[in-house]
Image (cartoon, grey):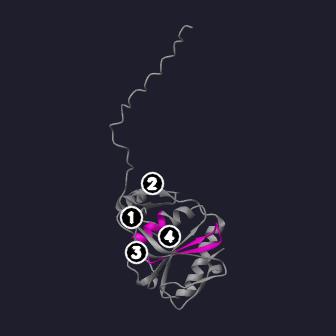
Amino acid sequence: MSAVALPAPPPAPPADPFAHLPPVAPLRWTREEYYRLAEAGYFAGKRVMLIDGEIIAMTPQNEPHSTGIIVSAVALHAAFGDEMTYRQQMPLNLGQASDPEPDIAVEAGPPRSQPRRHPTTALLVVEVADSSLAYDTGDKASLYAAGGIADYWVVDLVHNRLIVFRDPKPDAAARFGHGYTSIRYLGRADTVVPLAAPNSAVAVADLLP
């Protein structure tokens, strides 16, 4: 029997001529540059925020999200009283490269006592989350923990509950090097006591639309 010639193996793929080049890195902005872009009109008609030097588009609000912000603000005002400032979707200065706009941030002191600059901390930060739930409970939680926010709540519209984050600590595995060591999941029938208002209980049902 004569031998059967086998087909030649395919040629090796050519070497990547660009393998030696460094990976492409995103262009990062400082808060000052970010505000200059806003003043120049680059974000006209858009909702954006600065996180870790990146300009991120914010998703449009649906009706449950809007209602969640409104009812949460009313419930927090009842718990904290008139001597606080309730900032809704306004910047929180968490460093040179991050300027998030939490749905609600409770600041110590009435509005006219506040300095004329974006605050760098808050007694309580609240995010109302549906499509942004993974981000608000992941990277955003790490960002607030790194910023020293002791009390962070996520009104979870997907599961009809409240998630309470407390005790921020360093965490090398987290996006911003910090995370919360206490995470509680509360249902509509539960209540929660703000760290900065220990004599006031907030019904979770009052935070949900």
Is residue 4 at least partly visible in the picture? yes
The numbered disc on residue 148 is: 3
Asked whether 144 falls inside the magenta stretch, the response is: yes
Secondary structure at badge 4 equals: loop
Q: In the image, residue 94 lies at what x, y percent?
A: 39, 69
* Residue lying furthest front: 1
**Residue at image mark 2:** 42
Q: Residues within 10 Å of mark 1 (few under 14, many from 20)?
A: few
Name the secondary structure under disc 1.
loop
Q: Quick check: can you spot residue 92? A: no
Q: Are marks 4 and 2 in contact (CB under 8 Å)?
A: no
Region rendered in magenta = 139-164
Between 147 and 87, the one lying in front of the other is 147
Q: Of label 3 and label 4, which has the lower sequence position?
A: 4
Q: Secondary structure at mark 2?
A: loop
Give how far apart the Cα atoms at labels 1 and 4 are. 24 Å
Q: Secondary structure at mark 3?
A: loop
